[in-house]
Image: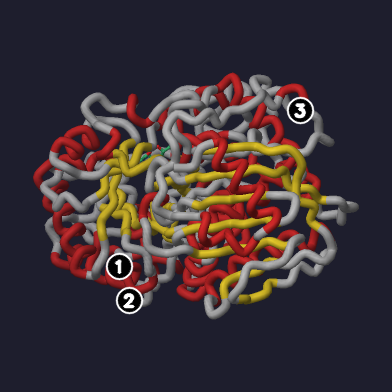
Amino acid sequence: MLTKRHAAAWIRILMVFPAAVPLLISCGSEIPAGEPTAGPSVTPSNTPEAPPTMHSLIPKPAFVHTLDGGFALTESAAIYVPSGNPEIEDIGRYLSTIWQGDTGFALPVIPSEAAPDSGNLYFTLEGGDPALGDEGYTLAISPDLVALAACSPAGLFRGVQTLRQLLPAAIESPERQPAPWVIPAGVIRDKPRFAWRGAMLDVARHFFGVDDVKAFIDWLAFYKMNRFHLHLTDDQGWRLMIRSWPLLAQTGGSTAVGGDPGGFYTREEYAEIIAYAQSRYITVVPEIDMPGHANAALSSYPELNCDGVAPPLHTGIDTGSQALCAGKDITQTFVDDVIREVAELTPGPYLHIGGDEVSTLSPGEYLSFVAFAQRTAEAYGKQVVGWDEIGAADLPTTAVVQYWSGPGAVAAARKGHPVVLSPASRTYLDMKYNPSTEWGLNWAGYIEVRTAYEWDPADILDGVAEEQILGVEAPLWTETIRTRGQMEYMIFPRLAGIAEIGWSAADGRGWDEYRFRLARHGVRWAAWGLHFYRSPQVPWI
Ligand code: NGO
Protein backbone atom coordinates (compact mmCIF):
# COMPACT_ATOMS: atom_id res chain seq x y z
CA MET A 1 0.00 0.00 0.00
CA LEU A 2 1.28 3.44 -0.87
CA THR A 3 0.99 5.93 1.96
CA LYS A 4 1.85 9.59 1.78
CA ARG A 5 5.12 8.90 3.55
CA HIS A 6 5.92 6.15 1.10
CA ALA A 7 5.17 8.49 -1.76
CA ALA A 8 7.60 11.11 -0.49
CA ALA A 9 10.26 8.48 0.13
CA TRP A 10 9.67 7.07 -3.30
CA ILE A 11 10.18 10.40 -4.96
CA ARG A 12 13.41 10.93 -3.00
CA ILE A 13 14.70 7.59 -4.25
CA LEU A 14 13.67 8.40 -7.79
CA MET A 15 15.65 11.60 -7.66
CA VAL A 16 18.92 9.85 -6.97
CA PHE A 17 18.25 6.44 -8.47
CA PRO A 18 15.77 6.51 -11.33
CA ALA A 19 16.55 2.92 -12.27
CA ALA A 20 14.65 1.85 -9.15
CA VAL A 21 11.28 2.71 -10.70
CA PRO A 22 10.33 -0.79 -11.79
CA LEU A 23 11.18 -2.16 -8.36
CA LEU A 24 9.14 0.44 -6.56
CA ILE A 25 6.06 0.20 -8.65
CA SER A 26 4.11 -2.88 -7.85
CA CYS A 27 1.00 -3.37 -9.89
CA GLY A 28 -0.40 -5.50 -7.11
CA SER A 29 -0.64 -2.93 -4.37
CA GLU A 30 -4.06 -1.59 -3.52
CA ILE A 31 -4.87 2.07 -3.83
CA PRO A 32 -5.23 3.18 -0.21
CA ALA A 33 -8.83 3.71 0.74
CA GLY A 34 -9.86 7.04 2.14
CA GLU A 35 -6.76 8.99 1.17
CA PRO A 36 -7.72 12.59 0.60
CA THR A 37 -7.28 13.41 -3.05
CA ALA A 38 -9.03 16.75 -3.18
CA GLY A 39 -6.13 18.63 -1.62
CA PRO A 40 -6.14 22.37 -1.42
CA SER A 41 -8.86 24.11 -3.35
CA VAL A 42 -7.78 25.22 -6.78
CA THR A 43 -9.70 28.46 -6.33
CA PRO A 44 -6.90 30.84 -5.29
CA SER A 45 -4.74 30.07 -8.30
CA ASN A 46 -7.54 29.88 -10.81
CA THR A 47 -6.13 32.23 -13.39
CA PRO A 48 -5.23 31.38 -16.97
CA GLU A 49 -1.53 31.76 -16.12
CA ALA A 50 -1.64 29.55 -13.02
CA PRO A 51 -0.15 26.17 -13.83
CA PRO A 52 -2.39 23.15 -13.42
CA THR A 53 -1.89 21.06 -10.32
CA MET A 54 -2.59 17.45 -9.52
CA HIS A 55 -5.80 18.77 -8.00
CA SER A 56 -7.16 20.20 -11.23
CA LEU A 57 -7.39 16.89 -13.08
CA ILE A 58 -10.60 15.57 -14.63
CA PRO A 59 -11.45 12.81 -13.96
CA LYS A 60 -10.21 13.06 -10.42
CA PRO A 61 -7.58 10.38 -9.71
CA ALA A 62 -7.97 7.76 -6.98
CA PHE A 63 -4.85 8.81 -5.05
CA VAL A 64 -2.81 11.98 -5.29
CA HIS A 65 0.16 13.07 -3.26
CA THR A 66 1.64 16.39 -4.28
CA LEU A 67 5.19 17.50 -3.64
CA ASP A 68 6.94 20.82 -4.02
CA GLY A 69 8.65 21.70 -7.24
CA GLY A 70 8.28 20.04 -10.57
CA PHE A 71 9.87 18.45 -13.60
CA ALA A 72 10.99 20.93 -16.25
CA LEU A 73 10.46 19.59 -19.74
CA THR A 74 13.37 20.82 -21.82
CA GLU A 75 14.66 20.54 -25.34
CA SER A 76 16.85 17.57 -24.43
CA ALA A 77 14.04 15.45 -22.93
CA ALA A 78 13.21 12.07 -24.44
CA ILE A 79 10.54 9.49 -23.78
CA TYR A 80 12.09 6.15 -22.83
CA VAL A 81 10.04 3.03 -23.46
CA PRO A 82 10.86 -0.66 -22.97
CA SER A 83 12.73 -2.09 -25.93
CA GLY A 84 10.94 -4.61 -28.11
CA ASN A 85 7.47 -3.27 -27.40
CA PRO A 86 6.14 -1.44 -30.47
CA GLU A 87 2.77 -0.80 -28.82
CA ILE A 88 4.36 1.25 -26.05
CA GLU A 89 6.57 2.97 -28.60
CA ASP A 90 3.36 4.05 -30.32
CA ILE A 91 2.03 5.47 -27.06
CA GLY A 92 5.30 7.36 -26.62
CA ARG A 93 5.03 8.71 -30.16
CA TYR A 94 1.41 9.72 -29.57
CA LEU A 95 2.46 11.97 -26.68
CA SER A 96 5.60 13.12 -28.41
CA THR A 97 3.64 14.19 -31.51
CA ILE A 98 1.16 16.18 -29.44
CA TRP A 99 3.85 17.93 -27.41
CA GLN A 100 6.30 18.39 -30.31
CA GLY A 101 3.92 20.67 -32.13
CA ASP A 102 3.39 22.82 -29.06
CA THR A 103 6.88 22.99 -27.62
CA GLY A 104 9.05 22.70 -30.69
CA PHE A 105 11.09 20.06 -28.80
CA ALA A 106 12.10 16.89 -30.61
CA LEU A 107 11.02 14.58 -27.76
CA PRO A 108 12.37 11.39 -29.34
CA VAL A 109 10.99 8.04 -28.25
CA ILE A 110 13.89 5.82 -27.20
CA PRO A 111 13.46 2.07 -26.69
CA SER A 112 15.81 1.02 -23.92
CA GLU A 113 16.44 -1.80 -21.45
CA ALA A 114 17.27 0.61 -18.66
CA ALA A 115 15.58 3.56 -16.99
CA PRO A 116 16.80 6.90 -18.32
CA ASP A 117 19.04 9.51 -16.80
CA SER A 118 17.53 12.55 -15.25
CA GLY A 119 15.61 15.01 -17.39
CA ASN A 120 13.59 12.37 -19.23
CA LEU A 121 10.25 10.61 -19.24
CA TYR A 122 10.02 6.91 -18.66
CA PHE A 123 7.10 4.63 -19.58
CA THR A 124 7.28 1.16 -18.15
CA LEU A 125 5.09 -1.91 -18.13
CA GLU A 126 5.02 -4.17 -15.16
CA GLY A 127 2.70 -6.91 -16.25
CA GLY A 128 0.75 -9.41 -14.40
CA ASP A 129 -1.06 -8.13 -11.39
CA PRO A 130 -4.64 -7.01 -11.95
CA ALA A 131 -5.18 -4.87 -8.81
CA LEU A 132 -4.96 -1.61 -10.75
CA GLY A 133 -6.78 -3.22 -13.64
CA ASP A 134 -5.96 -2.88 -17.30
CA GLU A 135 -6.51 0.84 -17.30
CA GLY A 136 -4.89 1.79 -13.99
CA TYR A 137 -1.51 3.50 -13.84
CA THR A 138 1.01 5.03 -11.48
CA LEU A 139 2.64 8.33 -12.27
CA ALA A 140 5.60 9.57 -10.25
CA ILE A 141 7.01 12.97 -11.04
CA SER A 142 10.18 14.28 -9.45
CA PRO A 143 12.32 17.23 -10.56
CA ASP A 144 14.52 14.61 -12.24
CA LEU A 145 12.18 12.18 -13.88
CA VAL A 146 8.65 11.48 -15.01
CA ALA A 147 7.92 7.78 -14.47
CA LEU A 148 4.69 6.29 -15.74
CA ALA A 149 3.98 2.65 -15.00
CA ALA A 150 1.02 0.42 -15.73
CA CYS A 151 0.19 -3.22 -16.05
CA SER A 152 -0.94 -2.84 -19.65
CA PRO A 153 -0.53 -0.39 -22.54
CA ALA A 154 -4.11 0.84 -21.97
CA GLY A 155 -3.08 1.96 -18.48
CA LEU A 156 -0.08 3.82 -19.89
CA PHE A 157 -2.35 5.52 -22.40
CA ARG A 158 -4.72 6.69 -19.64
CA GLY A 159 -1.73 7.92 -17.64
CA VAL A 160 -0.53 9.89 -20.66
CA GLN A 161 -3.81 11.83 -20.57
CA THR A 162 -3.06 12.75 -16.95
CA LEU A 163 0.36 13.98 -18.02
CA ARG A 164 -1.18 16.11 -20.77
CA GLN A 165 -3.48 17.75 -18.25
CA LEU A 166 -0.54 18.51 -15.95
CA LEU A 167 1.05 20.88 -18.44
CA PRO A 168 -0.45 24.35 -18.78
CA ALA A 169 -3.42 24.67 -21.12
CA ALA A 170 -1.36 26.89 -23.40
CA ILE A 171 0.43 23.74 -24.55
CA GLU A 172 -2.75 22.86 -26.44
CA SER A 173 -2.70 26.11 -28.34
CA PRO A 174 -1.97 25.93 -32.07
CA GLU A 175 0.70 28.62 -31.69
CA ARG A 176 4.04 27.57 -30.35
CA GLN A 177 4.47 28.65 -26.73
CA PRO A 178 7.74 29.63 -25.05
CA ALA A 179 9.33 27.25 -22.50
CA PRO A 180 9.66 26.43 -19.65
CA TRP A 181 7.13 23.66 -19.34
CA VAL A 182 6.90 22.43 -15.77
CA ILE A 183 5.03 19.32 -14.67
CA PRO A 184 4.19 19.50 -10.94
CA ALA A 185 5.92 16.91 -8.72
CA GLY A 186 4.03 14.20 -6.88
CA VAL A 187 2.60 10.74 -7.16
CA ILE A 188 -0.69 9.61 -8.64
CA ARG A 189 -2.08 6.11 -8.43
CA ASP A 190 -5.23 5.73 -10.35
CA LYS A 191 -7.79 3.30 -11.70
CA PRO A 192 -11.34 3.58 -13.01
CA ARG A 193 -14.45 2.88 -11.00
CA PHE A 194 -16.42 1.47 -13.96
CA ALA A 195 -15.35 -0.65 -16.91
CA TRP A 196 -17.66 1.08 -19.46
CA ARG A 197 -17.21 4.83 -19.83
CA GLY A 198 -18.62 5.97 -23.08
CA ALA A 199 -20.36 8.42 -25.31
CA MET A 200 -22.59 7.89 -28.32
CA LEU A 201 -22.74 9.84 -31.55
CA ASP A 202 -25.88 9.64 -33.69
CA VAL A 203 -24.64 9.91 -37.28
CA ALA A 204 -28.04 8.80 -38.63
CA ARG A 205 -30.15 11.90 -38.02
CA HIS A 206 -27.30 14.06 -39.26
CA PHE A 207 -24.22 12.62 -40.86
CA PHE A 208 -20.78 13.46 -39.52
CA GLY A 209 -17.71 12.64 -41.59
CA VAL A 210 -14.61 10.77 -40.51
CA ASP A 211 -12.76 13.90 -39.34
CA ASP A 212 -15.57 14.94 -37.02
CA VAL A 213 -15.75 11.41 -35.67
CA LYS A 214 -12.00 11.40 -35.02
CA ALA A 215 -12.29 14.67 -33.11
CA PHE A 216 -15.07 13.13 -31.03
CA ILE A 217 -12.87 10.11 -30.29
CA ASP A 218 -10.02 12.40 -29.23
CA TRP A 219 -12.29 14.19 -26.75
CA LEU A 220 -13.26 10.83 -25.25
CA ALA A 221 -9.61 9.82 -25.02
CA PHE A 222 -8.64 13.04 -23.23
CA TYR A 223 -11.16 12.25 -20.49
CA LYS A 224 -10.12 8.57 -20.23
CA MET A 225 -13.31 7.21 -21.77
CA ASN A 226 -13.12 3.81 -23.42
CA ARG A 227 -16.33 3.16 -25.39
CA PHE A 228 -17.45 4.94 -28.54
CA HIS A 229 -21.01 3.98 -29.43
CA LEU A 230 -21.75 4.81 -33.04
CA HIS A 231 -25.48 5.01 -33.80
CA LEU A 232 -25.24 4.09 -37.48
CA THR A 233 -28.84 3.65 -38.57
CA ASP A 234 -32.21 5.19 -37.86
CA ASP A 235 -35.38 6.30 -39.61
CA GLN A 236 -33.61 9.22 -41.26
CA GLY A 237 -30.41 7.58 -42.45
CA TRP A 238 -28.35 4.41 -42.94
CA ARG A 239 -24.68 5.30 -42.65
CA LEU A 240 -22.59 2.19 -43.28
CA MET A 241 -22.10 0.40 -46.59
CA ILE A 242 -23.36 -3.17 -46.36
CA ARG A 243 -22.09 -5.03 -49.45
CA SER A 244 -24.94 -7.52 -49.62
CA TRP A 245 -27.56 -4.74 -49.38
CA PRO A 246 -25.88 -1.72 -51.02
CA LEU A 247 -29.02 0.39 -51.36
CA LEU A 248 -29.20 0.74 -47.57
CA ALA A 249 -26.35 3.24 -47.75
CA GLN A 250 -26.89 4.49 -51.30
CA THR A 251 -30.61 5.22 -50.92
CA GLY A 252 -31.12 5.09 -47.15
CA GLY A 253 -28.05 7.23 -46.57
CA SER A 254 -28.88 9.84 -49.18
CA THR A 255 -30.47 12.40 -46.91
CA ALA A 256 -30.87 13.48 -43.27
CA VAL A 257 -33.24 15.35 -40.97
CA GLY A 258 -34.69 18.41 -42.68
CA GLY A 259 -33.54 17.12 -46.07
CA ASP A 260 -29.95 18.02 -45.12
CA PRO A 261 -27.14 16.29 -47.01
CA GLY A 262 -26.73 12.61 -46.23
CA GLY A 263 -23.67 10.41 -46.41
CA PHE A 264 -22.35 7.07 -45.31
CA TYR A 265 -19.06 5.42 -44.37
CA THR A 266 -17.48 3.06 -46.83
CA ARG A 267 -16.08 -0.10 -45.30
CA GLU A 268 -12.62 1.46 -45.51
CA GLU A 269 -13.74 4.61 -43.73
CA TYR A 270 -15.40 2.58 -41.01
CA ALA A 271 -12.16 0.58 -40.61
CA GLU A 272 -10.28 3.89 -40.34
CA ILE A 273 -12.59 5.00 -37.50
CA ILE A 274 -12.12 1.68 -35.71
CA ALA A 275 -8.33 1.86 -36.03
CA TYR A 276 -8.26 5.44 -34.78
CA ALA A 277 -10.33 4.48 -31.74
CA GLN A 278 -8.18 1.41 -31.12
CA SER A 279 -5.03 3.49 -31.11
CA ARG A 280 -6.65 5.44 -28.25
CA TYR A 281 -7.72 2.28 -26.40
CA ILE A 282 -11.36 2.95 -27.18
CA THR A 283 -13.73 0.17 -28.25
CA VAL A 284 -16.21 1.05 -30.98
CA VAL A 285 -19.74 -0.22 -30.30
CA PRO A 286 -21.63 -0.07 -33.63
CA GLU A 287 -25.41 0.18 -33.44
CA ILE A 288 -27.82 -1.06 -36.06
CA ASP A 289 -31.16 0.01 -34.65
CA MET A 290 -33.76 -2.77 -35.13
CA PRO A 291 -36.59 -3.64 -35.50
CA GLY A 292 -37.91 -0.07 -35.12
CA HIS A 293 -36.19 3.16 -36.21
CA ALA A 294 -35.73 1.34 -39.52
CA ASN A 295 -37.40 3.63 -42.05
CA ALA A 296 -34.17 4.20 -43.98
CA ALA A 297 -33.93 0.43 -44.58
CA LEU A 298 -37.64 0.11 -45.38
CA SER A 299 -37.43 2.88 -47.98
CA SER A 300 -34.38 1.31 -49.58
CA TYR A 301 -35.85 -2.18 -50.06
CA PRO A 302 -39.63 -2.57 -50.60
CA GLU A 303 -39.43 -6.30 -49.82
CA LEU A 304 -38.63 -5.54 -46.19
CA ASN A 305 -42.12 -4.06 -45.75
CA CYS A 306 -45.07 -6.30 -44.88
CA ASP A 307 -47.06 -4.81 -47.79
CA GLY A 308 -44.08 -4.81 -50.17
CA VAL A 309 -44.32 -1.04 -50.63
CA ALA A 310 -41.38 1.17 -49.74
CA PRO A 311 -42.28 4.25 -47.68
CA PRO A 312 -40.66 7.56 -48.66
CA LEU A 313 -37.37 8.58 -47.07
CA HIS A 314 -38.06 10.20 -43.72
CA THR A 315 -36.64 13.64 -42.97
CA GLY A 316 -38.79 14.65 -39.99
CA ILE A 317 -37.78 14.16 -36.37
CA ASP A 318 -40.87 12.29 -35.25
CA THR A 319 -40.65 8.56 -34.61
CA GLY A 320 -43.41 6.01 -35.10
CA SER A 321 -42.54 4.61 -38.49
CA GLN A 322 -43.21 0.94 -39.19
CA ALA A 323 -40.83 -1.64 -37.80
CA LEU A 324 -39.15 -4.30 -39.98
CA CYS A 325 -41.72 -6.90 -41.02
CA ALA A 326 -41.34 -9.52 -38.29
CA GLY A 327 -43.11 -12.36 -40.11
CA LYS A 328 -41.12 -12.40 -43.38
CA ASP A 329 -38.23 -14.75 -44.16
CA ILE A 330 -36.47 -11.94 -46.01
CA THR A 331 -36.31 -10.00 -42.72
CA GLN A 332 -34.29 -12.80 -41.20
CA THR A 333 -31.97 -12.89 -44.21
CA PHE A 334 -31.55 -9.12 -43.94
CA VAL A 335 -30.76 -9.25 -40.20
CA ASP A 336 -28.32 -12.10 -40.73
CA ASP A 337 -26.50 -10.37 -43.60
CA VAL A 338 -26.26 -7.02 -41.85
CA ILE A 339 -25.12 -8.43 -38.53
CA ARG A 340 -22.59 -10.68 -40.27
CA GLU A 341 -21.03 -7.80 -42.20
CA VAL A 342 -20.94 -5.43 -39.25
CA ALA A 343 -19.47 -8.16 -37.06
CA GLU A 344 -16.77 -8.87 -39.68
CA LEU A 345 -15.79 -5.21 -39.77
CA THR A 346 -15.81 -4.70 -36.00
CA PRO A 347 -13.00 -6.18 -33.91
CA GLY A 348 -14.54 -5.22 -30.54
CA PRO A 349 -16.75 -7.69 -28.66
CA TYR A 350 -20.01 -5.72 -28.88
CA LEU A 351 -22.79 -5.19 -31.37
CA HIS A 352 -25.66 -2.88 -30.41
CA ILE A 353 -29.01 -3.93 -31.83
CA GLY A 354 -31.03 -0.91 -30.68
CA GLY A 355 -34.44 -2.33 -29.84
CA ASP A 356 -35.91 0.98 -28.63
CA GLU A 357 -39.36 2.44 -29.20
CA VAL A 358 -41.14 -0.21 -31.23
CA SER A 359 -44.88 0.38 -31.37
CA THR A 360 -45.98 -1.47 -34.51
CA LEU A 361 -45.13 -5.04 -33.49
CA SER A 362 -47.00 -7.15 -30.95
CA PRO A 363 -45.04 -7.78 -27.72
CA GLY A 364 -44.55 -11.39 -28.83
CA GLU A 365 -43.22 -10.38 -32.26
CA TYR A 366 -40.90 -7.87 -30.63
CA LEU A 367 -39.48 -10.30 -28.08
CA SER A 368 -38.86 -13.05 -30.61
CA PHE A 369 -37.24 -10.56 -33.02
CA VAL A 370 -34.84 -9.40 -30.29
CA ALA A 371 -34.03 -12.99 -29.35
CA PHE A 372 -33.35 -13.78 -33.04
CA ALA A 373 -31.08 -10.74 -33.45
CA GLN A 374 -29.19 -11.73 -30.29
CA ARG A 375 -28.69 -15.31 -31.49
CA THR A 376 -27.47 -14.02 -34.83
CA ALA A 377 -24.97 -11.66 -33.22
CA GLU A 378 -23.76 -14.45 -30.98
CA ALA A 379 -23.33 -16.74 -33.98
CA TYR A 380 -21.00 -14.10 -35.45
CA GLY A 381 -19.06 -13.85 -32.19
CA LYS A 382 -20.60 -10.71 -30.75
CA GLN A 383 -22.07 -9.80 -27.39
CA VAL A 384 -25.31 -7.95 -27.80
CA VAL A 385 -26.05 -4.51 -26.36
CA GLY A 386 -29.54 -3.03 -26.59
CA TRP A 387 -31.62 -0.20 -25.21
CA ASP A 388 -33.73 -0.62 -22.08
CA GLU A 389 -36.62 -2.28 -23.92
CA ILE A 390 -34.64 -5.45 -24.74
CA GLY A 391 -34.58 -6.14 -20.99
CA ALA A 392 -38.00 -7.79 -21.38
CA ALA A 393 -36.65 -10.42 -23.80
CA ASP A 394 -35.32 -13.82 -22.88
CA LEU A 395 -31.61 -13.39 -23.53
CA PRO A 396 -28.39 -14.92 -22.20
CA THR A 397 -27.05 -12.88 -19.29
CA THR A 398 -24.10 -11.71 -21.40
CA ALA A 399 -26.49 -9.30 -23.16
CA VAL A 400 -25.84 -5.73 -21.97
CA VAL A 401 -28.90 -3.55 -21.35
CA GLN A 402 -28.55 0.21 -21.74
CA TYR A 403 -30.90 2.17 -19.52
CA TRP A 404 -32.28 5.43 -20.89
CA SER A 405 -35.80 5.45 -19.40
CA GLY A 406 -38.34 2.74 -18.70
CA PRO A 407 -38.42 -0.43 -16.60
CA GLY A 408 -36.42 -2.81 -18.84
CA ALA A 409 -32.98 -2.33 -17.29
CA VAL A 410 -34.20 -3.01 -13.75
CA ALA A 411 -35.94 -6.19 -14.93
CA ALA A 412 -32.79 -7.19 -16.82
CA ALA A 413 -30.54 -6.53 -13.82
CA ARG A 414 -32.77 -8.82 -11.77
CA LYS A 415 -32.12 -11.52 -14.33
CA GLY A 416 -28.38 -10.94 -14.03
CA HIS A 417 -27.63 -8.69 -17.04
CA PRO A 418 -24.99 -5.98 -16.81
CA VAL A 419 -26.44 -2.49 -17.18
CA VAL A 420 -25.00 0.62 -18.82
CA LEU A 421 -26.55 3.81 -17.46
CA SER A 422 -27.62 6.57 -19.82
CA PRO A 423 -30.41 8.19 -17.82
CA ALA A 424 -31.91 10.66 -20.29
CA SER A 425 -32.44 13.36 -17.66
CA ARG A 426 -28.71 13.34 -16.74
CA THR A 427 -26.64 12.05 -19.63
CA TYR A 428 -28.48 12.98 -22.85
CA LEU A 429 -26.18 15.48 -24.49
CA ASP A 430 -28.94 16.49 -26.90
CA MET A 431 -31.02 17.98 -24.08
CA LYS A 432 -30.90 21.76 -23.94
CA TYR A 433 -29.02 23.34 -21.02
CA ASN A 434 -31.86 25.78 -20.40
CA PRO A 435 -34.87 27.18 -22.30
CA SER A 436 -32.73 29.56 -24.31
CA THR A 437 -30.27 26.96 -25.64
CA GLU A 438 -30.50 27.27 -29.42
CA TRP A 439 -30.27 23.58 -30.30
CA GLY A 440 -31.37 20.38 -28.70
CA LEU A 441 -34.55 18.86 -27.33
CA ASN A 442 -36.10 19.07 -23.89
CA TRP A 443 -38.37 16.07 -23.52
CA ALA A 444 -36.18 14.76 -20.65
CA GLY A 445 -35.82 18.22 -19.11
CA TYR A 446 -33.08 20.83 -19.20
CA ILE A 447 -29.66 19.53 -18.28
CA GLU A 448 -27.40 22.21 -16.86
CA VAL A 449 -23.76 21.34 -16.20
CA ARG A 450 -24.46 20.73 -12.53
CA THR A 451 -27.39 18.39 -13.26
CA ALA A 452 -25.22 16.37 -15.64
CA TYR A 453 -22.52 16.07 -12.96
CA GLU A 454 -24.26 15.79 -9.61
CA TRP A 455 -25.51 12.20 -9.51
CA ASP A 456 -24.17 8.82 -8.66
CA PRO A 457 -24.66 5.68 -10.77
CA ALA A 458 -25.43 3.59 -7.69
CA ASP A 459 -28.46 5.80 -6.91
CA ILE A 460 -30.14 5.84 -10.31
CA LEU A 461 -32.08 2.59 -10.40
CA ASP A 462 -33.74 1.08 -7.35
CA GLY A 463 -32.61 -2.47 -6.93
CA VAL A 464 -29.62 -2.22 -9.30
CA ALA A 465 -26.48 -2.63 -7.24
CA GLU A 466 -23.10 -1.21 -8.15
CA GLU A 467 -21.78 -4.67 -9.12
CA GLN A 468 -24.35 -4.89 -11.89
CA ILE A 469 -23.55 -1.49 -13.31
CA LEU A 470 -21.09 -1.89 -16.12
CA GLY A 471 -20.75 1.85 -16.46
CA VAL A 472 -22.11 5.07 -17.89
CA GLU A 473 -22.60 6.51 -21.35
CA ALA A 474 -23.63 9.91 -22.66
CA PRO A 475 -25.51 9.85 -25.99
CA LEU A 476 -25.51 12.75 -28.44
CA TRP A 477 -28.63 12.39 -30.59
CA THR A 478 -28.52 14.70 -33.56
CA GLU A 479 -32.06 15.49 -34.69
CA THR A 480 -31.25 19.19 -34.13
CA ILE A 481 -27.44 19.05 -34.31
CA ARG A 482 -26.13 19.77 -37.78
CA THR A 483 -22.61 21.13 -37.44
CA ARG A 484 -19.36 20.45 -35.66
CA GLY A 485 -19.76 23.67 -33.65
CA GLN A 486 -23.22 22.64 -32.43
CA MET A 487 -21.86 19.23 -31.53
CA GLU A 488 -19.06 20.81 -29.48
CA TYR A 489 -21.49 23.12 -27.71
CA MET A 490 -23.74 20.29 -26.58
CA ILE A 491 -20.85 18.05 -25.53
CA PHE A 492 -18.77 20.56 -23.60
CA PRO A 493 -18.76 20.94 -20.65
CA ARG A 494 -21.07 18.01 -19.91
CA LEU A 495 -18.86 15.25 -21.28
CA ALA A 496 -16.14 15.94 -18.70
CA GLY A 497 -18.63 15.41 -15.87
CA ILE A 498 -19.90 12.10 -17.24
CA ALA A 499 -16.31 10.95 -17.71
CA GLU A 500 -15.57 11.73 -14.07
CA ILE A 501 -18.70 9.91 -12.89
CA GLY A 502 -17.51 6.84 -14.77
CA TRP A 503 -13.88 6.97 -13.66
CA SER A 504 -13.67 8.52 -10.19
CA ALA A 505 -14.77 7.19 -6.81
CA ALA A 506 -17.95 8.76 -5.45
CA ASP A 507 -16.17 9.73 -2.23
CA GLY A 508 -14.20 12.92 -2.53
CA ARG A 509 -15.83 14.35 -5.62
CA GLY A 510 -18.46 17.05 -5.41
CA TRP A 511 -19.87 19.93 -7.41
CA ASP A 512 -18.42 22.64 -5.16
CA GLU A 513 -14.84 21.72 -5.96
CA TYR A 514 -15.51 20.16 -9.38
CA ARG A 515 -16.73 23.44 -10.84
CA PHE A 516 -13.34 25.05 -10.12
CA ARG A 517 -11.51 22.19 -11.80
CA LEU A 518 -13.90 22.43 -14.71
CA ALA A 519 -13.26 26.14 -15.05
CA ARG A 520 -9.59 25.41 -15.74
CA HIS A 521 -10.58 23.03 -18.52
CA GLY A 522 -12.40 25.88 -20.23
CA VAL A 523 -8.99 27.48 -20.83
CA ARG A 524 -7.86 24.29 -22.54
CA TRP A 525 -11.01 24.01 -24.67
CA ALA A 526 -10.55 27.61 -25.73
CA ALA A 527 -6.98 26.76 -26.74
CA TRP A 528 -8.36 23.86 -28.79
CA GLY A 529 -10.72 26.33 -30.46
CA LEU A 530 -13.83 24.57 -29.17
CA HIS A 531 -17.19 26.25 -29.22
CA PHE A 532 -18.38 25.32 -25.72
CA TYR A 533 -21.24 26.38 -23.44
CA ARG A 534 -20.05 28.94 -20.89
CA SER A 535 -22.52 27.94 -18.21
CA PRO A 536 -23.14 30.59 -15.55
CA GLN A 537 -22.76 27.80 -12.98
CA VAL A 538 -19.02 27.55 -13.65
CA PRO A 539 -16.46 30.20 -12.50
CA TRP A 540 -14.75 30.39 -15.90
CA ILE A 541 -11.35 32.05 -15.99
C1 NGO B 1 -34.69 8.48 -27.41
C2 NGO B 1 -34.91 7.78 -28.73
C3 NGO B 1 -34.03 8.36 -29.84
C4 NGO B 1 -34.10 9.87 -29.85
C5 NGO B 1 -33.68 10.39 -28.48
C6 NGO B 1 -33.77 11.90 -28.44
C7 NGO B 1 -33.69 6.48 -27.36
C8 NGO B 1 -32.93 5.36 -26.81
N1 NGO B 1 -34.49 6.44 -28.40
O1 NGO B 1 -33.61 7.71 -26.85
O2 NGO B 1 -34.46 7.85 -31.08
O3 NGO B 1 -33.22 10.38 -30.82
O4 NGO B 1 -34.48 9.86 -27.46
O5 NGO B 1 -33.41 12.45 -27.22
Tell which tag, 3 or 1, sits nearer the viewer: 3
- Rounded to the nearest angstrom, the CA distance separating label 2 from label 3 is 57 Å
Whether residue 221 is situated above or below residue 410 in the rendered picture:
below
Please state the horizontal and vertical placement of residue 127, each as a whole percent of the image: 42, 64
Tell me: 75 left or right of 348. right
- Mark found first going from the N terminus, 3 or 1: 3
Say what amino acid the circle numbered 2 marks: Ser
**Residue lying furthest right:** 178
Q: Residue at x 75, y 50 (%)?
A: 143
Tell me: 271 left or right of 285. right
Residue 350 vs residue 405, the one in the foreground: 350
Please state the horizontal and vertical placement of residue 35, each as a whole percent of the image: 49, 31
How packed mark 2 is, by other alpha carbons closer than 10 Å (few <14, some 14-19, many 20 or more), is few
Say what amino acid the circle numbered 3 marks: Asn
Q: Residue at x 24, y 68 (%)?
A: 381
The residue under label 1 is: 338
Q: Could one spot residue 325 in this view of the protein?
A: yes
Q: Is mark 3 within 8 Å of ligand 1?
A: no
Q: Quadrant of residue 232?
A: bottom left
- Rounded to the nearest angstrom, the CA distance separating label 2 from label 1 is 8 Å
The residue under label 3 is: 46
Q: Could one spot residue 443 in this view of the protein?
A: no
Tell which tag, 2 or 1, sits nearer the viewer: 1
Do the numbered discs 2 and 3 sit on residues whose CB atoms are within 8 Å?
no
- Rounded to the nearest angstrom, the CA distance separating label 3 from label 1 is 52 Å
Q: How many marks?
A: 3
The residue under label 2 is: 244
- The disc label shown at residue 405, or none: none
Please state the horizontal and vertical placement of residue 136, each as a whole percent of the image: 47, 51
